[in-house]
Amino acid sequence: MPENSRTGRVTIPTQQGFAEETLRIARLWGADAVRNSDGTELERIDGLEASIYHTYFPARGHNEFIGPRPRLRPQMFLLSDRAVAEGGPLRIRPLAGYSTDQLELNLDDDPRRFWEVVDRTTGELVAEWSVDGDAVVIPEPVRWHEYTVSFLAYVAWDPVEMYNHLTNNWGDRERDIPLDIVHPECRAFTVEAYTAWLAEHPEVDVVRFTTFFYQFSLVFDDRDREKFVDWFGYGASVSPAMLDEFERRKGYRLRAEDFVDQGYANSTFRPPSQAYRDYIDVVGAVVTEAAEPLVRATQAAGKQAMMFLGDQWIGTEPYGERFAGLGMDAVVGSVGDGTTLRMIADIPGVWYTEGRFLPYFFPDTFRPGGDPAGEARQNWLQARRAILRRPIDRMGYGGYLSLAADFPDFVDEVAGITDQFRELHEHIAGTRPYSGLRVGVLNAWGRLRSWQAFTVAHALPYPRSSSYYGVLEALSGMSVDVEFLDFDSVTAHGVPEGIDVLVLAGAADTAFSGGDVWRGELTPVLRGWVRSGGGIIGIGEPSATAHQGRFFQLADCLGVDRERGWGQSTDCYWPQSTTEHPIIADLIDPLDTGDPVPGVQPISEDVQVLAATDHSVRAAAYRAGQGRSVYLAGLPYSTQNTRLLLRALHWAAGQEDVLGIWSAAHPDCEVHAYPQSGWWCLTNGSTQERTTTVRLGDGSTVTRTVPPGGIAWEPIR
């Protein structure tokens, strides 16, 4: 394949001893920047005109400082295994089942002050207990009651470096010990060390902070497997010093249970408590104050400051109130699909955004029998949809370039992808695409976690959330504007002006469905909005909490409620299901609503049941007052479900008349139009050639054929 005719907007990894091949691949991919990855070193390459990115780890890789100061390591509140009292004293080893390579009991600070022993059968604190070596002894437990110990442990090995170490078989390589920035000594050291580093690296153009100070919650078990992982988890930012800082700023004291949370560890799926929200705020303030001097020093040295959205990103949430004030030049993050791309592309307050595409050049993918070219192709097709809605400015890859070079089909595949990426920018030319609707996605986290619901990492949904994650993935490349709203702001201020449709998706009692929030004023606020003409899409168990004879508190707006067993004595008369409705008008394959939600029933015979299985509604449409609603049991991502959701949104908004503008008849194809730049394109998200009718902005139609995974651009007449 010849070198790309277009160049720029692409960053590639490099490593020592690989200069000649790096130059060849850089020219093939049109790269204008090179970077190192964890475990590699940069090497200047003769003949390659490229910016140099260099990773910098403010809170790891400084063993010479933190090694002699073990009390300055970050800590976690962890929960022991549950133990049942059978009679006599009960002995619990808190670290049993955890990796002792990663974690170390904190016996330096008085356990009686910070640890808690809880009778999990009653939920009561146990007063009488003692520490004996590496165990907690409860002298008089209640027989057959279950007990836990909530304890503090030092993070002795940086979790991401540990993951990379295990994945790449780094053997005897020195293990990185993290440091805790809440301590003044650590804060002074990071500034001093970074100032020296800047002076030693005049060749670097972009400093890629990976990231700043606190690792997301990543805990390994005693067999070096992931035991608990939450990309949003603040669990590894805890220490007695941080608890003191919290009390100074907020005026009250946190306890161990505020962190272990009955064992759920404040998972992002849990409706957040006020204490946890306050803790997020304090950590954000501490991190911002400590990161600002590093950012300013970077820019004073004539370099750009880039933040990697991952690893130690806790406290620098880019949709938080403080991030824009940090003054970062750029953000780079991992792109696993359209949702994760939008998570990066929509970030405000930075000069440019960059996506690290998959697969990562690690041996778990680049191995005999692996299909990195196929992974790259699929990754690109989903990301491309989102780029066409909100482009990232740059793209790139990470890992060991020497591994990728051994797969020529992958190298050629990426050459085509990078060329197409630049072509998108040429046609979009910085303009906004046509949008037919303004959609609000409502959950407990709102704008703070824009495009981040249901995410593990790299676009991996949790096993029980794929039916909901598909909603975001469909929206990420859809011809609508998307805004993320939280329950508290809507309760206080109502639905923002201009929102056409609200989407409420999630399982009962999660942060995304809402739980007990529906027992307050949120319910009448939204009920009034819908009945006054608003549209709502409910997916899974929307507005679910058992209260006053309802489970779905917005059942009167949605047209359905979930029967969980208490109302079986009451007859329910179902309307005749219909197969004639605009929402399901162009289904090709059978309707796929993902994991079943049992017992969903119509509340009246006026409900239009579009699909049902095992006497449970899977899809329904309803008119409530002047408003409209659509219920779906779930929405796993597919091209057909994307079209289904688009039709549902337009119907719920009462705007079916504009549904066909800038659209393709075949569900595998999508149209994106840019009136200001004067271009439109037709994409094919399938692996087969598609011929389809396209409706243009003026209502006229044309027929076009697009190759598998292809894209075709045309000027707007």
Image (cartoon, helix red, strand yellow):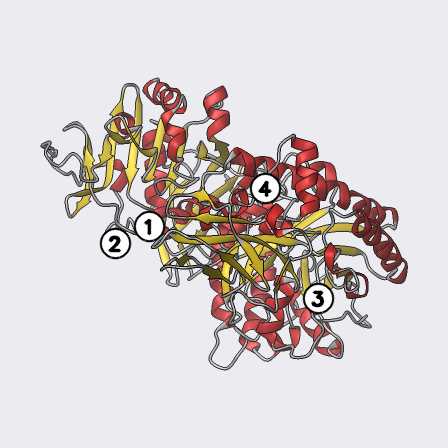
Of labels 4 and 1, earlier in sequence is 4
Secondary structure at numbered mark 1: helix
Camera sees residue 349: no
Which residue is labeled 3 in the image?
176
Residue 346's label in the rendered image is 4
Real-space Cα separation, disc 3 to disc 1, in angstroms? 47 Å
Q: Is residue 34 visible to us here?
A: yes
Up-down relation of residue 319 to residue 462 (above or below): above
Q: How many callouts does the rendering have? A: 4
Going from the N terminus, do you reach mark 2 or mark 4 first?
4
Closer mark to the observer between disc 4 and disc 1? 4
Q: Residue at x 72, y 52 (%)?
A: 180
User: In the rendered image, which residue does mark 2 sit on?
Assistant: 589
Tell me: 198 left or right of 25: right
Q: Closest to the observer: 268 or 236?
A: 236
**Residue bearing the label numbered 1:** 640
The answer to whether 565 appears left or right of 141 in the picture is left
Mark 1 or mark 2, earlier in chain? 2
